[in-house]
Image (cartoon, rainbow, N blue to C red):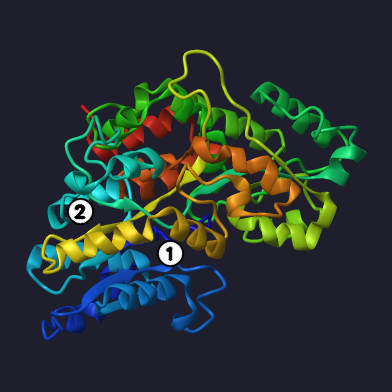
Amino acid sequence: MKSKKTLSVVLLIVVIVLSCFSFTACNKNVDDTELTIWIGGSVVGENEVEESQDSWILQKLVNEYAKQFNVSVKLTYFEDEEAMVQLVANNGRSGNEVPDIACVYSSEILRDMSDVLYPLKSYITDEEKEHIMFWETVTDNGRSIEESNEVYGYPIGGTEVTFIAYNKSLFREAGLDAEKNPPETFDEFESICETLAQKGVLPIVASDDGWNELYVQLFAKEWMQFVDDPTIISEAKGELSFSNDKHLLSSLETMATYFSKGYINQDYATNEDATTLFANGKAAMFSCSNYDINLYADIMGDDFGALWVPDYSGDVVRDAICFGGCNQCFSVTKDSNHKDEAIALIKWMSNKENNIRMAQKFGCFPNRNDIALDEYDNNPSEVVQVIYPLLPYAHCTADYLMPMNVYTEFYRRSLSVVIGEMTPEEFGIEMDEITNAK
């Protein structure tokens, strides 16, 4: 999913929007000869929304497929993507209208909808298993295809990778040369922050944005490198305890320490302008993703640099990780009358050529491992050259491993830890109360 997350933290909004769709959703007078697709903003380019739908890359692909294979396909866009996903789930359970194909959120949200989706594992080819990335986000247990019983979607839309954007001029003025000596550990990263702060430069500017963005995209790295996905999934379900997860609590404590030392802007919880502040030289670093590259390149020019987020070492479950990944997929509904046709269309959209076309238009990277940099971009910028190698290490953020009612509380309470209103231990206890951890 894109860096500007579309997931709402106010569940009431979903209920209200769903009621607005209820009339059309219950109308079964649809053309049964037409293949239908429902999408939201995660597979629409940021600049495309302002253009006519006929100009969207996904609509163009649909039109090409329809013409080539002589089928009728209708693509419907929902402005409120979360409401659309919930509508698919609700209608699938109540027998109301559903599309043949729906673009839905991966990981736990997808697994919660598995009762209304058509199982796809038997249709996946060896070529697709080898080259399409992020299958673990669409399996029934968060593991690889081989270790899973079923698959409920094809990862689609491209890959987001996060990195640390930095202002080269501010680094040079502080006597730092990140090009020759990039931080490889968090101790080295903290030393850079201290040097910048001593020079009177704000090291990091960020905004909570309703989902504790800086923690989820940067400081959660300790948690995600030392704790595997099935464990986090079990914690979010109450089968294991957040309170006993030392790496989760330690990672929250680390960010709280950075905040208390002034390495992070003190209005983090309320700031809504971190992007502009960084672009205009008001801070040295910003947690960034490949979706933001063009914006900063246009404003900052040669001052725009990129660093990999440092790695932890020791008894890690992943040697390296960057956050982002591919957080949506194309799924076929169980009630579809055109399952074979729907699967064929998804496979066609997932091939190498079409994956490149989508990724280029969306401003992200491909979600296939057989696409070299020069195939994706024949004139890559310095920043793209630095971060494209992160592609194999991309992974969804921890919140995608949690049910909706859990991650909304996770956001709020983890923010309270960061700004000093709650201790990590209190956070763990409260999260366990929410999940009814035994």
Q: Amino acid at mark 1?
A: Val
Residue at 24% from the left image edge and 33% from the top image edge: 238
How many numbered markers are drawn?
A: 2
Q: Amino acid at mark 2?
A: Met
Name the spot of residue 119 as percent of width and height, x first: 16, 50
Residue 179 appears in which quarter of the rendering? top right
Name the spot of residue 98 as percent of width and height, x first: 18, 70
Mark 1 surroundings: few (<14), some (14-19) or many (≥20) residues within 10 A = many
Please say whether residue 92 is visible from this viewpoint.
yes
Left or right of 176 in this view: 388: left
Residue 43 has which mark?
Answer: 1
Residue at 40% from the left image edge and 58% from the top image edge: 7
Residue 163 appears in which quarter of the rendering? top right
**Is the N terminus in the top left, top right, bottom left or bottom right quadrant?**
bottom left
Name the spot of residue 2 as percent of width and height, x first: 49, 57
Q: CA distance from mark 1 to mark 2?
A: 20 Å
Mark 2 surroundings: few (<14), some (14-19) or many (≥20) residues within 10 A = many
- In the displayed structure, 305 sits above or below 38; it is above
Left or right of 102 in this view: 398: right
Residue bearing the label numbered 2: 113
**Is the C terminus in the top left, top right, bottom left or bottom right quadrant?**
top left
Which mark lies nearer to you, 1 or 2? 1
Nearest to the observer: residue 357 or residue 310: 357
Q: Secondary structure at mark 2?
A: loop
Residue at 12% from the left image edge and 60% from the top image edge: 334
Nearest to the observer: residue 37 or residue 424: 37
